[in-house]
Image: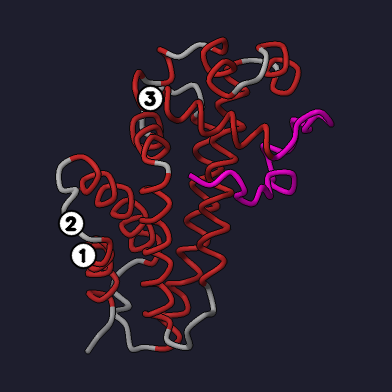
Amino acid sequence: MSTTEPDPSETGAGLSEKKLRPGRTNATKQRLFEASMELIGERGAAGVTVDEIAAAAGVSKGTVYYNFGSKSDLIAQLLRHGVDIMLGRLQDVRGQSNDPLESMNNMVGQAMEFMDDYPSFARLWVSENWRTPGEWSAVFAELRAELLAVIGSAVESVAAGYKVDESIARGSLEAAIFGAIFVVGLDRQTYNPERTREQSVAAVMTIMHGYVIK
């Protein structure tokens, strides 16, 4: 697993209101992210302590508290970090093709690769995102909006380049694609590991192809 992922969290809205302290480095945050995701994947967020995360990441508990303040803030910032990684990958493939459908196909492929690299993040997202009430509900709402905006932009590009079914609400379409990415990705990890990345991407893209009028 790479430890050199981009970290654009300092420029994010909302979550950036809690300023990052100078002692926090990208490398430390990535180690904490990977360690916490592994532990959370085994026992869930509630079953993991700051001591365990710090030990697994090779940093002191004091360093975690100094940089993040609390376990809740740590998880919130690591959710931000994970989404920044995913957004970076999606942005990397935007515009690589003149065909908007192919461009979206590439974006879904990047999302699948992200979940292959960080399977516990996808499980945390699904298990906590729709929990009501949830400790990180506001965080999830903000991060979900950012991911939906990227998907929405891709949908707009398809609508500009193809004849599409205008009776389908764009917001519902974006939400369906967003949800399918996580559901199909987790289904592949948990129940169908033999399914290829391309097959998983094709399953998600059936939603988009259903929007395009042949």
Q: Quadrant of the C terminus?
A: bottom left
Q: Compared with residue 47, is residue 154 higher up or lower down, i.e. above or below? A: below
Residue 191 or residue 170, whichever sits in front: 191
The residue shown at (36%, 40%) is 119
- What kind of element bears circle 1? helix
Task: Classify mark 3: helix, strand or loop.
Answer: loop
Label drawn at residue 132 = 3
Q: Main secondary structure of the magenta part?
A: loop
Mark 3 vs mark 1, CA separation in Å:
33 Å
Question: For residue 3: magenta?
Answer: yes
User: For numbered disc 2, what is the local secondary structure?
Assistant: loop
Q: Name the kind of residue labelled 3 in the image.
A: Thr
Residues under numbered marks 2 and 1 in contact, where contact means CB atoms less than 8 Å apart: yes
Residue range of the region highlighted in magenta in the rendering: 1-26
Q: Is residue 199 above or below residue 55?
A: below
Which comes before the other along the chain, label 3 or label 1?
3
**Real-space CA distance between mark 3 and mark 2, rounded to the nearest whole angstrom:** 32 Å
- Colour pattern: secondary structure
Label of residue 199 in the image = 1
- Which residue does the image show at 74% across and 30% down from the upper left? 18
- Write down the quadrant of residue 169 in the picture: bottom left
Identify which residue is drawn at 37% across, 21% down.
44
User: Which amino acid lies under the numbered mark 2 shown in the image of this protein?
Assistant: Arg
Pinpoint residue 7: horizontal percent, then vertical percent: 66, 47
**How far apart, in angstroms, are the residues tagged by discs 2 and 1?**
6 Å
Per the image, the residue denoted by label 2 is 195
